């Protein structure tokens, strides 16, 4: 695709850049090659990256965490695969900038929200939630999410929510539920970027799914052969290989008024590698 033109940043606005699910080594390549330039070009104040699939398609590792931070990510969010690999537990526990869904079981390592200081006068609250439809059991993202938002708003009006969920209806419902109390709710998990970017009546920016940063030449990150085996032989198990080719970065950019926390603009991002 031709070089994407980014919207101009409104005067006085704060800009958030969010990158959709980083998938495997191809996703890491895209982040390393494309993210530093995108941050500079967009003049973003904060860059959040969903990293739950960054290690071979499931989980993350201390080395990958460092790589994503070195490329410019300020905060990493997660989802159902965040705690897939034991080797990441200590890093998740000790680094407040690596989030897992807040509504995971309470004994889970790590945390689900934080306030990030972009500058002495600019702070964003980041909240990570996971859905319950067609995913492993978790606590209620609606009530726990609203309670977390109340706590975050004691420190800042700018609040971003990464809602890692399977069902479109659940994502839209949470957005309606929190509309006017958060700056943006962006969905992750399906690895397919949707085209419903909008600002809801209460001033909350919304997108059902930010998409995937990684190989688009297979099936949502998996190589085609592995994906087809799962559908043709559902009882047979089999490997889950990472696809190659068509490496692409997907994400979204949100501008907001720091005084009110209301979104001013939202733009989907797509950048191809090579």
Image (tube, grey):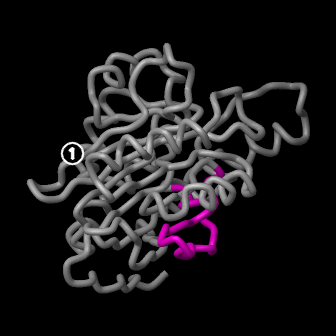
Give the SS element for disc 1. Answer: helix
- According to the image, label 1 marks what residue? 70
**Does the segment drawn in magenta span residue 182?**
no
Task: Spot the residue most to the left.
Answer: 120
Circle 1 crowding by C-alpha within 10 Å: few under 14, some 14–19, many from 20? few
In this picture, residue 154 sits left or right of residue 250: left
**Does the segment drawn in magenta span residue 209?**
yes
Q: Residue at x 72, y 57 (%)?
A: 168
The answer to which image quadrant residue 215 occupies is: bottom right
Q: Residue at x 65, y 46 (%)?
A: 165
The reply to whether residue 25 is visible in this rendering is: no
Q: Residue at x 67, y 60 (%)?
A: 172
The reply to whether residue 232 is visible in this rendering is: yes
Q: Looking at the image, is 253 positioned above or below residue 33?
A: below
Q: Looking at the image, is 139 positioned above or below residue 14?
A: above
Q: Which residues are magenta?
A: 190-212
Give x and y (percent) for residue 10. 27, 83
The answer to which image quadrant residue 198 occupies is: bottom right
């Amino acid at each position: 695709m031709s070089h994407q033109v980014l919207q101009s940043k409104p005067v006085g606005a704060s800009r958030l850049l969010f990158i959709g699910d980083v998938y495997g080594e191809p996703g890491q390549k895209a982040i390393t090659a494309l993210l530093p330039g995108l941050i500079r070009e967009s003049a973003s104040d904060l860059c959040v990256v969903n990293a739950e699939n960054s290690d071979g398609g499931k989980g993350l590792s201390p080395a990958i965490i460092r790589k994503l931070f070195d490329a410019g990510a300020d905060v990493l969010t997660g989802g159902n695969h965040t705690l897939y690999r034991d080797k990441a537990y200590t890093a998740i526990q000790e680094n407040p900038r690596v989030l897992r869904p807040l509504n995971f079981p309470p004994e889970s390592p790590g945390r689900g929200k934080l306030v990030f200081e972009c500058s002495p006068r600019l702070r964003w609250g980041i909240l990570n939630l996971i859905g319950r439809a067609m995913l492993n059991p978790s606590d209620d993202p609606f009530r726990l999410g609203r309670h977390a938002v109340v706590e975050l708003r004691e420190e800042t009006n700018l609040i971003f929510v990464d809602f890692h969920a399977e069902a479109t209806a659940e994502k839209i419902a949470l957005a309606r539920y929190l509309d006017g109390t958060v700056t943006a709710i962006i969905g992750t998990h399906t690895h397919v970027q949707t085209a419903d970017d909008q600002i809801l009546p209460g001033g909350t920016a919304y997108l059902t799914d930010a998409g995937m940063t990684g190989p688009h030449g297979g099936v949502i990150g998996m190589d085609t052969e592995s994906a087809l085996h799962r559908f043709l032989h559902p009882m047979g198990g089999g490997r889950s290989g990472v696809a190659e080719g068509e490496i692409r970065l997907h994400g979204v950019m949100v501008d907001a008024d720091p005084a009110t926390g209301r979104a001013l603009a939202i733009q989907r991002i797509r950048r191809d590698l090579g």
